[in-house]
Amino acid sequence: MKLYNNKIVYDPPYECGVGEVGGPYRVTVDPDRCVWCGICVTSCTHKLTDMNRKECVFEMREYPVDSGGRRLTGASAVIDGHLQKELHIMDIDCCNCKRCVAMCPTNAIIVDRNPNHSVIGTGSIGSREILQNVRRAYGKSMVGSMSDFQRPLEWENFLIDASIILNPPRDNINEFAGRLTNCYLGKHPKRRLKVGIPVLDSHMSYGSNSHEAMLARLIASIKLKRPFFTGEGYLHPDFAPGFKHSILQFGTGGFGPWVDLKEFAGISMKYGQDAKKGKGGKLPAPKNDYEIALLRCIEPYRDVNSPNPQHLQYSIEELKMRVESLRAVLGEDKLVGADIYGTAWNAEHIILALAQAGFDYITIRGGGGTTGAAGTTDLQNKGLDILYFGKVAHDALRREGLREKISLIGEGNFTSPKAAMLGLMVGFDFVGTGSRHLFPLGCTMCLRCHTGQCSWGITSRRYGNRIDPEEGSEMIVRMMGSWQRGLEGLAAGLGFTTHEEAVGSRKFRYHGTDPLLYDLFGRGKF
Amino acid sequence: MSVREIRPLDFHPQNLAPGSCGLYAAAGEVDLMASLRAASELQGRGTSGAGVFIKGIYPEYKELYALHVMYFNRDIARELESLFTEHKLGLHHIGEMEAMVEASMYRKFSLPELRRYFVDLPTKDQMLRRYLTVDPDTYVRRVVEKFNTTYVGKARIFSSGKNVGTFVTAYDLKTTIEAYSLSKFASRPITAMMTHMRWPTSIVETGVWYGIHPISFINSHIIHNGDLSSAPSNRQGIEAAGVTQMVGTDSEAILLEVDNLLRGRNMSYQQIEWAMCRMYPQEEEKLSEKERGEYEDIFRNNPELGRFKMSGPSSFVSIIRKDGVARVISGRDRDGLRQLWMGRSKDGKTVIWSSEEKCIYQTAFLTGKKYKSVNCEPGKITVFELNESGVLNGVFGETL
């Protein structure tokens, strides 16, 4: 069969008018390089504007032609060895996930920003503000994922006292200086969980992640000898062998069949998440399929909220009773933790109340955290810097003599081993990262988690089979191994030989422009 | 090929890099002046700031607590002295206030106002009312903690044990000996002494008020050589154990750790060694199953012990009294970054610890005794028991 007079066609937008400035990204295919294989068509999964469209951003149309290149129709449309292919591109739905770019065998596709979309407005009121309000005017959904409102944290403005000349232990034959492999989660003798690395995977729900992505992360956590934190969405029964390595999260949604609780290593009480203030976490209807609904014991194909704030269980007076009743049910050897977000004014009191109630660990989420799905307004409502909460929590617990009775986990944009080391040094026993664990699986932060159309199969159950859990877990393990080496290098330079020595040592200084951070870590002794 | 010029070594203090401390301790039959002379060999190692601890100097008042107090100046001394003399602190003052240094020394050197008080305990009822304890040592410790934390920058009790005394100045060892006229104690039945030369490295701003060694609380005393990279962790560990810190240096944290492990937790010497020095992974593998279980259990059951490890260069000698018997505990960091030499006389009656071996030679020369010496093994502690009459008994580790 011969291909004849193939074309690349850029489809016109569905409609014109206010706000129709095209999609945020522009897709261009080089016709000289394209081999018309159609991999881009199967790669792309994103269509939001017209759900009736057969394909997504790419669509391949084929026409039989005669030897002269004329299209054949009707009875004469018998393929006689000549075919014309047209690659139609509707880039209004493109989210820059780069799956097509990564899969294209000839590197013919270029995805870049659409200037028509981004170059409008003024310096102070830009395209984001204008187009958001236009979306509201058109009655479109205001649910988003992760956050492009994230304030970048200034990790580079923290100066670590590395390479102290006199201090580092130097017996490298007998001991690798700065070993951070012996960490304990929980401080009670009956329930101290040995953890192989001070960087943990954050809570993410089964349902927000696909089966395969969840499995890859679970396997990676087991390989790294650390607990696996589930989200509110319980765990699939297929993961039963991994229950004993998992800590189950319970939130106000109350999702789950609540069976086999004793199989889990512990339970986390979710009292808030920084990225989901206001209405709280949301599982959009398209992602709430029958299996998820069955697992969560809810009605399928409708939006599901995990309400927040959580007065039902946030009563300080009842916290102790709640912990004790959980211990009575689960047994003394199970960890019971609390997940909170960093509140603006009373974080200290909440943390102390939780510690006094007898929780084994507190997970604090700071302003840099992201989420799979939440309202735009909630995403804009970013909290304070996580290092601030680390200092507040560590100092308050020290003052009350509770610091060695409870572990602290910090989450919120710990982007690198240096950031993680700062988290440890400010006072967290562990730091958690969520999206970092998705990057090896293909995540490019395209912010479409909430649509259930993730082309990499991370947050879309339909395309989950694009991930090989075994290979994915290996990549996460390798990535975390690299983080571990980075952390240990810094620890060795600082003269630490154990995990405990790093925690709360505060051997750094801030020299950036953030007034809060400068007050805390830039001025005087801290 | 060029020939490198070899210069003769010059040990003049000015030509030595300041950076390490001089540490010297002796226990058993101690010749005070010979020991001080030998210790002064180490003066060149560091900067100024020197202290001497002597055990057995107040035999006539051995049932009373001897408080050595420094006031910032005479006005403050006048203001605060009534706390001691009029029993306001909860201790009964016996006898008269004694000036620790002669008046001429204040003209010769810049010294804080230095005074000594011998005090006794109140009734048990009063002790209970004030600090909820009837244990004499705990009670006096609470009094000292309260005083030292209340009057920071104004006054400090820098020695508070029975029949022991610590003497510190911001000058070198020779001046310290001269200012306090330490030679007058030479004839007393001294059973142990410790000296240390140099300001502490971990905090310098509090200087003479808090930094200079020996650090001494009631019956626990230490000299420490090194700059611990684990200092913040050690301090937090001791804080988590519920022990009040008055000085805030790494040396104090080490003293309080040993004290807490030995007296507070009643741990064995082996467990103290494990907590402070830890084992290498391959050493752990060689342990029997029972021992390994015991080793892991002490850290699993006591989360704060994870913070007790000394990391970075360190060597120390501490004297801690428990159940009426003083324990001289010495140790060295596991990586062997700081030296600690130990010498024992051939008759076994005297043991000396020093930063450098030359002090042991010097002592041997001055006292006419024969000594055998060894560089202490890194990561190991050595323990001697020392009774009131100065008889030494090696009980743990390499005791020669």
Image (tube, helix red, strand yellow):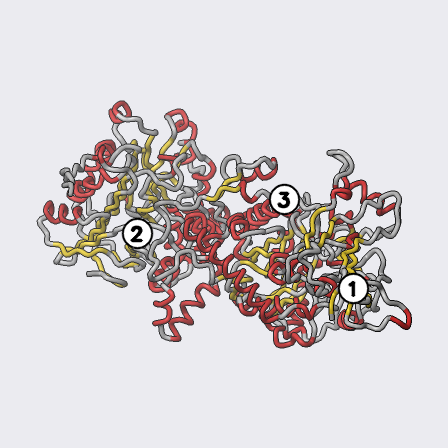
Is A234 left or right of A66, judged from the image as shown? left
Please report, as a chain letter, where disc 2 is located.
B
User: What's under tag 2, amino acid-wise?
Assistant: Leu
| Nearest to the observer: residue A276 or residue B21 | A276
Q: Which image quadrant for residue B46?
A: top left
> Label 2 to label 1, Cα distance in Å?
78 Å
Task: Give a yes or no on whether discs 3 and 2 share a subunit.
Answer: no
Mark number, residue A248: none
Q: Is residue A236 above or below residue A32?
A: below
Ranked by sequence position, the earlier of labels 1 and 3 is 1
Residue at position x 82%, y 67% from top? A66
- Percent across and percent down for residue A33 are 66, 57
Name the kind of residue labelled 3 in the image: Pro
- The answer, for residue A232, to whether it is visible in the render is no
Residue hosting label 3? A152
Residue found at the far left of this picture: B368
| Disc 1: host chain | A
Q: Nearer the viewer, mark 1 or mark 3?
A: 1
What subunit carries mark 3? A
Where is mark 2, residue-wise? B337
As drawn, which residue projects farthest toward the top? B107
User: Is label 1 on the same chain as label 3?
Assistant: yes
Q: CA distance from mark 3 to mark 2?
A: 42 Å
Question: Cα distance, mark 1 to mark 3?
Answer: 49 Å
Q: At numbered mark 1, what does the secondary structure look like: helix, strand or loop?
A: strand
Q: Amino acid at mark 1?
A: Gln
The answer to whether residue A491 is left or right of residue B358 is right
**Residue denoted by label 1:** A84
